[in-house]
């Protein structure tokens, strides 16, 4: 009987060790996966981590490749030279609101690499940034952009968080806008910037401009 009790004790003890080891393996795997979703460290210039500063500029990061909704209604010019906010160029967007894809809305994500909807690792670790700022103006004024945002791309390698502002009615003069990021997890951000609008808010379409899009500490 004594030996039987000892055998039972050893079996229970062995089972507990096995469970503990398995739990440790799960925790280790979770930590590993979290580490995998920490992006490439964002290299901040003196005044910020830029999404766009000028056309073909080495400080630019990510590509405006994630066209959504009625993407056929959008025209984009990354080197528009008429009245940029700063430098030599700004970005011009023409939205026709024709509904070519039948969605009734459209938008564009800046992604890294291009066309990355979360299938590839490419996000940035932008922790330390307190806000994203950008300058925008409408061609005539009263152009309504439903949302400007960062993050929100899913997939196998999803963005760690998202935050946006809007709707915003643009003016014909350059205005600076801010997305506050103090409470946002910026460990992995693939969709570093995005805008979206719709035909209900712009039944005749609209033309608007963006410039100097950057993360600031």
Image (cartoon, rainbow, N blue to C red):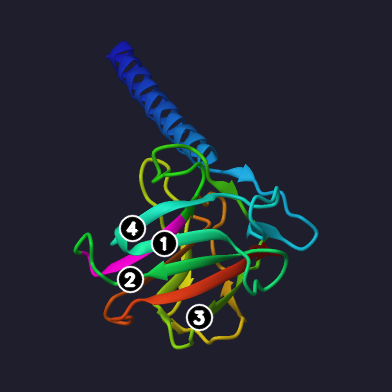
Q: Is residue 104 above or below residue 192?
A: below
Cα separation between marks 2 and 4: 14 Å
* Image spot of residue 119 (x, y percent): 39, 38
Q: Earlier in the sequence, mark 2 or mark 1?
A: 1
Q: Residue at x 56, y 69 (%)?
A: 210
Q: Is residue 201 above or below residue 211?
A: below
Cα separation between marks 3 and 2: 14 Å
Q: According to the image, label 3 marks what residue?
A: 138
What range is drawn magenta here? 103-109
Q: Which mark is residue 132?
A: none
Instruction: Tell us which disc is closer to us: 2 or 4.
Output: 2
Q: Earlier in the sequence, mark 3 or mark 1?
A: 1
Choose top left, top right, bottom left or bottom right for residue 145: bottom left
User: Contact (CB < 8 A) between labels 3 and 1?
Assistant: no
Q: Secondary structure at mark 2?
A: loop
Which quadrant is home to the N terminus? Answer: top left
Q: According to the image, label 1 marks what residue?
A: 75
Number of residues whose C-alpha sits closer than 10 Å to that of mark 3, classed few (under 14), some (14–19) or many (20 or more):
many
Number of residues whose C-alpha sits closer than 10 Å to that of mark 4, classed few (under 14), some (14–19) or many (20 or more):
some
Which of 87 and 108 lies nearest the eye of the viewer?
Answer: 87
Which quadrant is home to the C terminus? Answer: bottom right
What is the count of numbered marks? 4
Q: According to the image, label 4 marks what residue?
A: 68
Q: Earlier in the sequence, mark 4 or mark 3?
A: 4
Instruction: Tell us which disc is closer to us: 4 or 3.
Output: 3
Q: Earlier in the sequence, mark 4 or mark 1?
A: 4
Q: Residue furthest top?
A: 3
Instruction: Tell us which disc is closer to us: 4 or 1.
Output: 1
Number of residues whose C-alpha sits closer than 10 Å to that of mark 1, classed few (under 14), some (14–19) or many (20 or more):
few
Cα separation between marks 2 and 1: 9 Å
Q: Residue furthest left?
A: 102
């Amino acid at each position: 009987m004594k030996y039987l009790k000892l055998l039972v004790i050893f079996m229970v003890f062995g089972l507990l060790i096995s469970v503990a080891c398995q739990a440790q393996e799960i925790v280790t795997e979770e930590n590993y996966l979290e580490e995998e979703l920490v992006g490439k460290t964002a290299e901040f210039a003196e005044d910020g981590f830029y999404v766009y500063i000028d056309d073909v500029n080495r400080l630019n990061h990510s590509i405006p490749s994630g066209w959504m909704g009625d993407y056929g209604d959008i025209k984009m010019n990354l080197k528009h030279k008429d009245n940029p906010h700063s430098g030599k160029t700004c970005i011009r967007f023409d939205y026709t609101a024709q509904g070519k894809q039948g969605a009734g809305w459209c938008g564009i994500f800046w992604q890294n690499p291009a066309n990355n909807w979360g299938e590839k690792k490419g996000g940035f670790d932008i922790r330390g940034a307190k806000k994203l700022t950008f300058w925008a103006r409408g061609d005539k004024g009263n152009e309504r952009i439903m949302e400007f945002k960062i993050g929100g791309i899913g997939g196998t390698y999803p963005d760690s968080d998202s935050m946006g502002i809007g709707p915003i009615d643009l003016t014909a003069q350059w205005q600076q806008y801010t997305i506050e990021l103090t409470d946002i997890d910026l460990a992995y951000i693939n969709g570093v910037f995005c805008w979206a609008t719709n035909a209900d808010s712009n039944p005749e379409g609209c033309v608007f401009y963006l410039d100097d899009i950057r993360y600031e500490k």
